[in-house]
Every structure is written in structure tokens, then in C-alpha cells.
Amino acid sequence: MAATTDSPALPGADFNWQKAVAAYTRPSMPRSLWQLATSLLPYVALWIAMYWSVQVSYPLTLALAVLAGGFLVRIFIIFHDCGHGSFFESQQLNHLVGSLCGIIVFTPYFEWRHAHAIHHATAGDLNRRGIGDVLTLTVDEYRALPGYKRLGYRLYRNPLMMFLLGPLLMFLIVHRIPSRNSRRRERNSVYWTNVALLAWIVPLMLIMGPGRFLLIMVPVAFVAGVGGVWMFYVQHQFENVYWASHGDWDYVKAALQGSSFYQLPRVLQWFTGNIGFHHIHHLSPRIPNYNLEACHKATPEFQAAATITLLPSLKTVRYKLWDEGQHKMVGFREATMRQPRPELAASGQ
């Protein structure tokens, strides 16, 4: 399929998407356990290899860290599926494995699960932005901001902040603090995750030495954080993505038009746990990651999704604002060149 980010043709009114996905929503215990084994065991083995390689060649350690970061992204996908209740049939098992994987990926399971559920329920809704998503302003909202707030938004959307510094801040610092409106279970998951992190980080530092530990952990966390944030960003920030006011918001359109099919090379698709089939994931988050590709291939209506391939996806970093007049994402230059809508200009905004 040719790579395109044009608005996809939506299925006809007679298309029963619930029926189309039903056969793929049941998790397989053997496949889930195999995915756990092929993600966790190589990650541990790479840590052991990096521990020894630090003494021999740090460039070798960094090369291994890139690979370990890939496996950490894959572990995050398992964590993510557990949060949706799609990795195992048993919700208790999902919560247990999700919480344990959360300790590995520096993310409190129940706190993240709650915010991510809101993201799925509100993606593409202009009136329900701000939880579990990448902050996106409209052109008119941006133009109405005072200068210092424009600067703050520009800094937030700067690629250096978004993809380099931001992931480390998010996973190492922001996830250590409960959000202001956290309920008891979500708040406790933050505290217990912090305790569990100390329980494995402190002994490893004592065994390896703090310096050697950081020489390994920081590049691994950096690679995984950058990769994870990029995947989340690119699948909701392409040019012809879907945004609508709450009264016009439609769940199916938000999934099939507001989430891309990120068509990656097979090795990257494997490390990212098929999350590139994001349009299907948003339509039915109860599909385990290992069933997403089969669902996509079996249903022609899903193959019309906005498709992005690796190199063209790099240009999505220029999209910063939603233009309600043109119904597409634009950059800052286009936003500053366009005049505000008449009703905003008349009000003096």
C-alpha cells in the first residue's frame, strides 16, 4: 500500500466493525506467555552483557543499550495491553503482570491505566483535551495567547523537548508523583511503584557501583523513552488527523481517521508490538497486540486508514497546531501567517 496521510474513506453505514474485530479480541495464553518470555529474558540477558561490556568497551555497551531499549519498548507494550485488559483473559493476571512490567518501565500501572483510558475515550475531541495526550492547541487558541504562553507552547512542542528531554522527564520524574486528581488506587500505585524501583535499583547500584549502573540505565531509558514517545506522537499528529468539537465527535471517526497505520519495517514492528496498527487499536483496545496485524489484513475497511511509513513520518514534527478552518494540522509559520477567524478578531482576541 502506498504511504499516504490523506483522510481515509470511512466504512459504509452497513459496516459492522464490532463483528469485524470480535474474532481477534480473545487473548491466547500461550502467545502471551511466549511474548513475555521473548521480551523479559533477552532484556535481562542484555543487562548482564552490558554489565560486562562496560569494563571492555563502552561503545559496545551503547550498542547493546540500543537493543535493550527496543526490548524495553516491547515490555511497555505488554504493560499497555495489560492496562487495556487485553493481554490475559483474567483481569487479576493483567493487573499483576501489568504492575510488574510497570516497575521495569518506570510507570505506575493503575495511574497510567486511568489516564490512558481517558485518552482512548477523548482522542480527537477538542473539548476534552489534556489527559493522556500530547497537548495540541488550535490555531485560534494559539493566536489568542499572550507572548509568554506562546513561548511556553513552542518550547513544549520543540522536538528537542518533545523527543529528547521530555521522555526522561516523564518516565524518571513525572511518573514518580501522583496527579492532582488521582484516586486512592492510582495514587497508591505511584507510591508502590516508587518503593519497588528503589528495591531493585539500590541493590544493583551496590553490586555494580552507581557509576556503572547509570552508564547502563541512562542510555537504555533514553532509547526506550524516545522510541515510545515518538510512537505515541506520530500516530496522532499527522496532517489530516481527526479533531472535532464534542457535539460532532464520533468514536469510529476518531479511531479510523484520528489514528494512523504506522507501517514500519518488520523488525521495528516486532519491537513496537504491532502498535503501528493504531487505528485498529483505538477502535478496539481489547485486541491483544499480537492479533492487530491479522485483524488489519482480514478487513478491507481497515486497510483504508491513513498510512505513514518511516521516512515520511519524520515530517510530522513540523505539525504543531490544529487549523479548524482547513481541518488539518499546520506548523507555527502557517499559523502566524493566517488571519484569525472574524469572531475572534471582533472580540479583540
Image: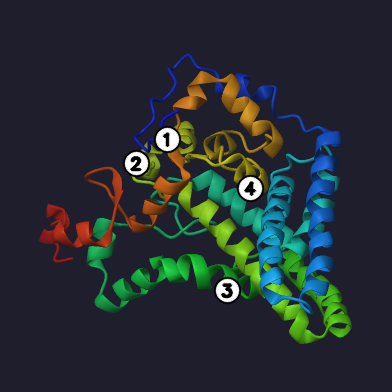
Dot 1, how many residues are within 10 Å of its Cα: few (below 14), some (14-19), or many (20+)? Answer: many
Q: Can residue 142 be seen in this view?
A: yes
The type of residue carrying mark 1 is: Ala
Q: Nearer the viewer, mark 4 or mark 2?
A: 4
Label disc, if present, on residue 272 of the rendered structure: 4
Say which residue label 2 marks.
240
Marks 3 and 2, how far apart in space? Answer: 29 Å
Relative image position of residue 51 (x, y in whole percent): 81, 73
Residue at left offset 71%, top offset 70%: 61
Query: Dots 4 and 1: beta carbons under 8 Å?
Result: no
The type of residue carrying mark 3 is: Leu
The type of residue carrying mark 2 is: Asn
Dot 3, how many residues are within 10 Å of its Cα: few (below 14), some (14-19), or many (20+)? Answer: few
First in sequence, mark 3 or 2: give its number: 3
The image quadrant that residue 141 belongs to is: bottom left
Say which residue label 1 marks.
306
Say which residue label 3 marks.
169
The image quadrant that residue 218 belongs to is: bottom right
Q: Is residue 329 left or right of residue 216?
A: left
First in sequence, mark 4 or 1: give its number: 4
Residue at left offset 53%, top offset 52%: 232
The type of residue carrying mark 4 is: Thr
Q: Is mark 3 on a helix, strand or loop?
A: helix
Q: Is mark 4 on a helix, strand or loop?
A: loop
Relative image position of residue 2 (x, y in whole percent): 41, 30
